[in-house]
Amino acid sequence: MDKIAVLDFGGQYAHLIANRIRRLGVLAEILIPQNLVDPAEELKTFCGIILSGGPQSVLGEDAPTIDSAIFELKKPMLGICYGMQLFVKKLEGKVKKVGGGEFGKSKLKILTKSKLFTGIPKTSVAWMSHGDEVVELPAGFEKIASTEDCEFAAIEDSAKQIFGVQFHPEVVHTKFGEKIFKNFLKITRAKKSWTMDQFLKTEISHIKKQVGKRKVFMLVSGGVDSAVGFALLEKALGRKNIFGLMVDHGLLRKNEAEKVHKSLKKAGFKNLKIINESKHFLAALKNITDPEEKRRVIGRVFLKVQRKALKRLRFNPREWLLGQGTIYPDTIESAGTVNADKIKTHHNRVPEIEAMIEKNLVIEPLAQLYKDEVREVGKKLKLPKNLIERHPFPGPGLGVRIICGESKNLKIKNKIASELNRKWRTKGKVLPIRSVGVQGDSRSYAYPVALFTASRDFEKLDEIAIWLVNKYPEINRVVLCLNSSKVPRTFQACFMKLTCSRIDLAREADEIVNKALISKKLYSKVWQFPVVLAPVFESEKEGEAVILRPINSEEAMTANFARLPKSFLNEVTKKLMKLDGVENVFLDITNKPPATIEWE
Ligand code: XMP
C-alpha cells in the first residue's frame, strides 16, 4: 500500500496531519524522528515525507532534528512550521525568534504559481501558531506565499519538490488546508487505499487480541466518546464480557446522571451501573485550586472509585481490563508523545493510568481518533443520534469550569488598556485571573483582557482579540462584557474554593445557557459551550463572573469562537445576572490557539 511518513516533532497537530492524509484515502504513518536508526533507509519505502510542527525552537540546543541524508532520497517533502524551519536550518538558510509570535487566524497571500497551491485563491485564511520564523532562504528556494506578519509563510524548491509552510494546513481553520494536502499527495503520486470501514475491522481484531480471555470494566460518562467506546468493545467482545460503570462525581450538569443513565439504557446498554461518589471527589478537591492539580486529583479519585467498585462487585482485578473512551486530543494535550509539550492533564491520562497502560491493563479503542471520527464510528455502530450529537463535556466536569483564583496578588500592566484605546478606540481592562492557552505548541497560563463596548461586530472584535494576544505575551484570551459597556474603575479577584454553593451556581448558569440554546434552536449550531465561573468582581462585595465560551470546531484541536445572535446573548445575560452572586457576564471571543476551549 502506498504510504506517507509523518515525522512527529511533538506539534499539537502532528497526529492530525496523518489523520488528514488518511481522510484523503492514503495511509499515513507517524514516526518519531529520534527513534529512527537509519532515517534515509527507513523512509525509502514512503511516497512522501511530512515534517510536523513542534513546541521547541530549532535554535535550541536540544531541539529534535533529522539526518540530512533524507534530503538525498529525492522524495517530495512538506515541512510544516517547526518542520519547515528545521529543513531551512539544515539546508543553510536562517531562522530567528521574532516579536511576540503569531497565533490563530492570518491572511495568506499567494505570490507565485506553485503546484502546492493549485486551485487555491490568491488570498485566504491560514492558521498560525509560532514564535520563530524563517528569515533567509536556503539556495534553490523561493518564497511562494506571505502573511502580514510573516514574510516566508510558504516556500519551495520546485526542482527538488521540497515545500515548506509556516501555517498549519492540517487544521480545519486553514480554509484550503485540505486542498494543499490533496496537491501534495498528487505531487507524491501516492495511490488511495484507506477507508473508515477498514479502520473498524482492524480495531476490532486489535481489541480481541489485546483483551484475550479477560473482560473489560469501562468507565462511561454518557458523553460521545465513552458511549461509542463501550459500543465498539461490546461489538468486539460480546455483551457479557463488558461492564459499564458511570460515576457521578458531583461535578456533573444539572440532573445529568439520571438523564445519561436513562438514555444509555434506552440505547441498549445493559451491563451498566451508576454510583454516586460525589462526597469522595468533593472532599479530595476541598483545598485544591491549581488547575493541573485539580485535574490530577480528579483522575486519581476516578481510579480509586473504580478499584473500590471492582471489589464490591467481587470482580478479580487480574481478569478485568480498564476501558476508557480516551480520544487523541486527550493524549497529545497531556504530552502523550515524546516531543510534545504538556498543555493540560486530561483526567484519563494521569500518571497512575499511564503506569497501568505500561502494564497492558487499559484498553482505549478510540485513542487514535478525533471527535468527528468517533461520531462516524458511532453512526456505523447505529447508536442513537441524540447520543452521538451531544456536545462534548470534559471528564473532570464543572471542576475545570470553576476557577478558584489565586491567593497571591497578581501584578498586571495596565498600559495595555491605553494602547487598546489608542489603536482600536475600544475600552478594555486586564482581568486579575489566569487561564490556560496553547501557543506555538506550548502551554500558556496568562491573563484575559475584558473589552467594554456596545459593538457586536464579531469580525472586528476577532481582529482586536488576535492583535491583543499576538502583541502581549502576558495575554492569552479576550472576553467581551455582555452586561455593560461602561468600564469599571477596578476589577478585583479573590481566592475561592470549590464549594458546593459554587458548584450549584455553575450548574444553574450552565442550565440557563443550555435551555436557551435548545429553545432558540442553536444547539446544533455550536460545537461546544462551556460556561465558566470566575471569582472576579468590581464592587466591594465579592461576587462571580460567568464566562460564556461557545465555540465551533471539528476535532477540538483548533476552534473559532461561535458568533451567536444578539437576541440570544441578551436573553441569557439577563437571566444570568439575576442569579445570586453573579456580577458580570462575559463572552469569550478568543480562538484556539491561542486559548484552549476550556479555561483550565
Ligand atoms: P481544551 O480545553 O484543551 O479541550 O481545548 C479540548 C476538548 O477536550 C475536552 N477536555 C477534556 N475531556 N477529559 C476529557 O474527557 C479532560 O480532562 C478534558 N479536558 C478538556 C474539552 O471539553 C474540549 O472538548
Image (cartoon, helix red, strand yellow):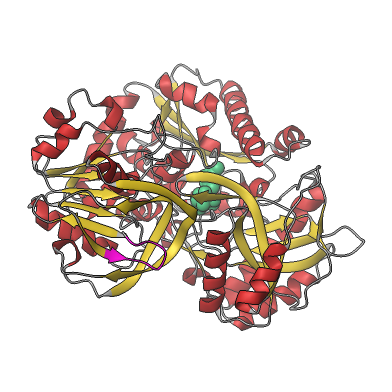
Q: Is residue 71 visible?
A: yes
Q: Is residue 383 above or below residue 482?
A: above
Residue 2 sits above or below residue 509 on the image: above
Q: Main secondary structure of the magenta part?
A: loop
Say whether residue 600 is visible.
no
* Figure quadrant of the N terminus: top left
Image coords of residue 148 (percent x, y)? 40, 68
Residue 298 x, y percent position in the rendering = 63, 36
| Quadrant of res 311 | top right
x 50%, y 38%: residue: 342
Residue found at x 72% / y 53%: 433
User: Which residue sits at x=42%, y=64%?
Assistant: 149
* Residue 546 position by quadrant: bottom right
Q: Is residue 580 left or right of residue 365?
A: right
Q: Is residue 146 magenta?
A: yes
In this rendering, position of residue 540 left or right of residue 565:
right
Residue 469, position in %: x, y?
56, 60
Numbered circles on residues, count: 0
Who is closer to the viewer here, 17 or 500? 17
- Residue depicted at 37% across the width and 41% down the height: 366
For the magenta stretch, what is the residue range? 145-151
Q: Is residue 300 left or right of residue 57?
A: right
Extreme-right residue of the structure:
540
**464 in magenta:** no
Residue in front for this viewpoint, 270 or 49: 49
**Residue 208: horizontal and vertical position, in percent?**
29, 29
State left or right for residue 289 relative to residue 383.
Answer: right
